[in-house]
Amino acid sequence: MQHTMPAASHAHHTDPRDLLPRDEPVRLIDESGSSHVDDGYPMPADELLRRAYRGLVEGRRINDQANALVRQGRLAVYPSSHGQEACQIAASLVLGAQDWLFPTYRDSVSVIARGVSPADAMVLLKGDWHSGYDPHEHHVAPQTTPLATQLLHAVGFAQAAKHRGEDTVVLAMCGDGSTSEGDFHEALNFAAVFHVPVVFFVQNNEFAISVPLSRQTAAPSLAHKAIGYGMPGRRVDGNDVAALLAVLGEAVDRARAGGGPTLVEAHTYRMQAHTNADDDTRYRERAEVQAWVAKDPLTRLRTHLTARGLLDEAREQELAEGAETIAAALRDALNADTDLDPEDLFRFVRSTRSPQLQEQWHQLRDELERSGSAHEASAHEASAHEASAHEGGIR
């Protein structure tokens, strides 16, 4: 029997010139905090900018607290999004309640901004459950560590939602390193051919761990990759939350209206090491990192809102206190002792446990029991020795 692919949902032929990204990324607020007029994109509403600023303040505090918890041994690893908070917050704010977010391991701030509790979002990075939250409750897929695999999942999910006639848009996040993966190609190609309601959001922070962008692609920009698939490519200043809200918002609206997928590239920078296990001084100069301090998304929006009378010291204090409450909750949750059941490693692999898994569980259980007995005996011996020494001292 001959197998054929199902026909694409609709034939569309677009002038490639309409898909091309701009020569320069879209910007609405410059590095000094001043408004930058753009005929193609209006400035977001004041209330949305205020919400975005609150998210930036909370996101920065979450990043700082998580880094501290790594140093204290309470988190196994933390891929910081310090400096990329504008991307994180905008990705959450442009989505409706019915939409879905497909994040990566670096997108904890975006996951939290979507409504997941900070403690649940960090479970994966603590080395506990793969995902500490219910994806269906928050419409947030589990954070993924393998590069680009979530893009395929996002496209499949969006295609299923389209078949069901749901009003759902999926925003799939990834980094520049993911664009070098085969899964990236497959996801974009399928999404474009079948006109799937998904937005591919690439946070181009210049490095795939230690590999600079120049060693990953020869394209004029990552957004230019969209043209080969037949979807629009957009470039945006990834440290300008206003521009991100405008560009991502347009892409989400386009997908919801049946216009198909869009690839959005945000130009930003990873201010800290890839993770706590990385020494970034081995592959980039401190002067390069320092040059991006002036482009900080948090200070940029703060300056803009203050100049327009939309932010004052009292509001700043209120936001700082709210962020500290979140940080305290995260700190308390991760400092609390956890009661883990080692059988969970085997309990949820299959609906019916295989003989091989059962054998492995029995082996681990026996080892734990022997280890526990040895520890108990050692503790008893130490206690007896201490008691004997104490009695000898009394005599």
Image (spheres, grey):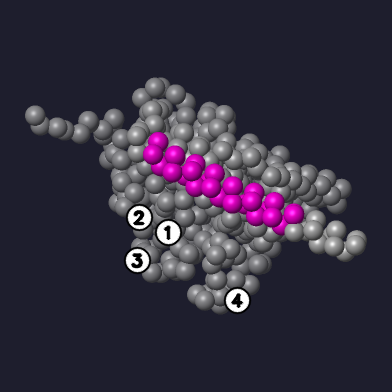
Between the C-alphas of marks 2 and 4, the distance is 29 Å
Comes first in the chain, label 3 or label 4: 3
Magenta stretch: residue 377 in it?
A: yes
Residue lying at the far front in this picture: please name it: 395
| Quadrant that contains the C terminus | bottom right
Q: Is residue 300 left or right of residue 257?
A: right
| Quadrant that contains the N terminus | top left
Packing grade of label 4 (10 A; few <14, some 14-19, many >=20) is few
Question: Which quadrant of the structure image shows residue 258?
Answer: top left
Mark 1 touches mark 2? (CB < 8 Å): yes
Q: Position of residue 325 (x, y in %)?
A: 78, 44
Q: Pointer 1: what residue? A: 177
Q: Secondary structure at mark 3?
A: loop
- The image's mark for residue 286 is 4
Q: Is residue 84 visible?
A: no
Q: Pointer 3: what residue? A: 218
Comes first in the chain, label 2 or label 4: 2
Mark 3 touches mark 4? (CB < 8 Å): no
Q: Position of residue 165 (x, y in %)?
A: 41, 22
**Magenta-highlighted residues:** 358-384
Amino acid type at circle 1 is Gly
Q: Residue at x 31, y 35 (%)?
A: 194
